[in-house]
Image (cartoon, helix red, strand yellow):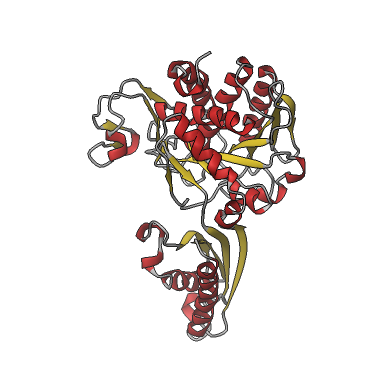
Amino acid sequence: MKDPAVIDAAALENMIVPRFLAYVRVCTTSDSRSETTPTSEGQWDLARMLEEELKRLGAAEVTLTGACYVIARIPASVGKEGAPVIGFMAHLDTSPDAPGADVQPVLVRNYDGRRIALDAGIALDPALDADLAAQTGRDIIHTSGATLLGADDKAGIAEIMGAVEFLLLHPEISHGPLEIIFTPDEETGKGLPQFPVSRLRAETCYTLDGGPEGELEIECFNAYGVDVHFQGKVIHPGTARGIMLNAALMSSVYAAMLPRSESPEATDGYYGYYCLTRIQGNHEEALAEFILRDFSRDGIDRRLAAMDAFARAVEAQFPGGTVTVTAKPQYFNMREKIETRPAALEKLKTAAERVGINFLLKPIRGGTDGSRLTELGIPTPNIFTGGRNFHSRSEWISVPEMTAACRLIIELAREWAG
């Protein structure tokens, strides 16, 4: 048997790409306004598909929980039963930021390096995208332009499932006990309160939920969702002088107070932001929804305090109106806890080197379910999937980078076996 570092890429590709093309066709868009878990029925469809597939492959203890978590176990190789249990995790849902129904993925063999015209006047242009230009001569998969692609995070699911198939087909590859976890509602954070941590045995876990090949991540934003409710006073506009308090206008004034230099489109690296995600209302009442992100606890506290200060400023401009700010934590920076368990990162680095991946540690300008799992006591670094332009109609993914992620999973399983 070949060493995983030199496994024929075509063999792994055949385990990954057909799965990915099937998974992305299942609409799993999550819904931040839903109170159910999962927040969309399609997530059940994909979860059941994965449950059956894991059983067919021969995984053990395959479970689909009442909150739509898929958990399965891969028994250790003979003689490696005492090795630490490690987990691999990806999420079922896709972002509501772009349409996710009726996805039509396009597999391009031997990409010629030219501009690719998509639907709705969108294009993938290598002149504007160095990562895309670098894929010339390689295979890529892109969206039609009518929807997002869903590589975030169905690429992670396909890569994990490809590794599961490979390991179960090749028992000569030594590994310890493995745990496979697929989660709902990562994009909205709605599934996090239901996270079945008591069911997990893994001492360390890895999410497959990143971008270009080689990017490994152990730190993320501290994240809050903030709802701001505006209560005004309604009366006919013709007799409104001195009486009306326009809640819709109050919400607009509030949103305009957010510093433009601290918005997503104005920041990168370690700079946090305020982001208005939704606003609706009328004269009587309105609701604005925001997300706040910052890498430091002091920074996120400053932003939360600013949201309250903006509320008081709006009330001062609209005497008699009220502004109520409700903040809910979503996840916290996982770096501090991961660094207390250095083996999680050291073994990841070693595995990457063994399969010839030049890794780069970088911060996640977002979060993963690994952020929550780390907070619950299981350190969970994040691994690349090969995807680009997540949450958009111009999303695409590199097939060779998908196979690289799959090779890394296999090597990590070997590394933890000792």
Q: Is residue 101 visible?
A: no
Residue drawn 62% across the image and 47% down it: 379
Count of marks, rendered view? 0
Residue 39 higher or lower than 273, as above or below? above
Taking the spot 56% from the left edge, 80% from the top edge, the residue there is 321
Q: Which of 54 and 188 is in front in this view?
A: 54
User: Where residue 121 sits: x, y (%)?
Assistant: 30, 38
Instruction: Give the percent coordinates (x, y) of residue 369.
Output: 60, 46
Residue at the image point whose x is 55% and y is 27% from the top: 410
Q: Is residue 20 rendered to the left or right of residue 189?
A: left
375 or 326: nearer the viewer: 375
Coordinates of residue 367 in the picture (x, y in percent): 53, 50
Query: Which image quadrant: the C terminus?
Result: top right
Residue 191's x, y, as percent?
66, 47
Front position in the image: 280 or 42: 42
Query: Is 345 rendered above or below residue 239?
Result: above
Q: Is residue 76 left or right of residue 124?
A: right
Q: Let me know if residue 166 appears in the view.
A: yes
Taking the image as shown, residue 215 lies to the left or right of residue 35, namely left
